[in-house]
Image (spheres, helix red, strand yellow):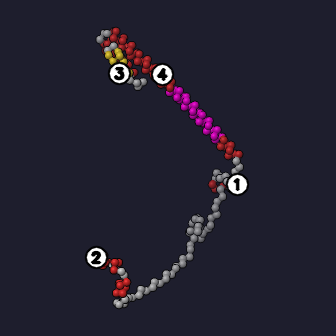
Amino acid sequence: MNRVFDSSGPEGKVRGTPQQIIDKYNQLARDAQLSNDRVATETFQQHAEHYMRMLSEATREMEMRREEQERQNRERQIERDREREERLARQEQQAASQPKPVEQTEVPADPAAAPQPDVMETSVQSGLVETPETQSKPKTRQRRKPRPKPVEQTADQAPAAEATVPRSETPDAAE
């Protein structure tokens, strides 16, 4: 349908898709009819009819391919559905044949019917459950050890401390 054809007609080549060629030959046939050329009119109409048949054949083939593809898709979908049903049936059969573990209990549909945890009453009726994190702890303060008081240096002890520091570590040594 979208294929480009070269048509060698009575008045030269016509190029385009089948629909474009049909339109061109119909226009040429109208022009020939207006100029009272019956032979040219008939020739252009025959050429247009030829491409109309080609177009209808291509359309029919495409429709047949589309229907065949849809049929194959339906068959594949039916096969997938059947395989899915078989797999689900096997899984249900396996689940029914295996004994349920003792720890596993069925959950009732109504949550109110399920066993509820114990709630501890507190002195304040807040409706909250008392947890270890919320319980009050006795506050005990740890006493700090007193710092030793710095020993005051006398004037004659200060130069001795400077003498023990190597000369390369003093700020003056950098200069």
Tell me the SS state at disc 1.
Answer: loop
Q: Is residue 62 visible?
A: yes
> Which residue shows up at 38% across the image and 23% down it?
4
Nearer-N-terminus badge (2/3): 3
Stretch of the chain drawn in magenta: 66-89
Q: CA distance from mark 2 to mark 3?
A: 95 Å
Residue 19 is situated, as x and y percent measured from the top left of the image, at: 39, 22
Residue 157 is situated, as x and y percent measured from the top left of the image, at: 37, 89
Q: CA distance from mark 1 to mark 2?
A: 84 Å
> Which residue shows up at 64% across the image and 38% down it?
86
- Residue extending farthest to the left is 175
Of labels 3 and 1, the one closer to you:
3
Disc on res. 15:
3
Residues under numbered marks 1 and 4 in contact, where contact means CB atoms less than 8 Å apart: no
Residue designated by label 2: 175
Residue designated by label 1: 102
Q: Amino acid at mark 3?
A: Arg
Disc on res. 152:
none
> Which residue shows up at 59% across the image and 65% down it?
129
Residue designated by label 4: 60
Q: CA distance from mark 3 to mark 1?
A: 82 Å
Nearer-N-terminus badge (1/2): 1
Q: Residues within 10 Å of mark 2 (few under 14, many from 20)?
A: few
Residues under numbered marks 1 and 2 in contact, where contact means CB atoms less than 8 Å apart: no
Q: Amino acid at mark 1?
A: Val
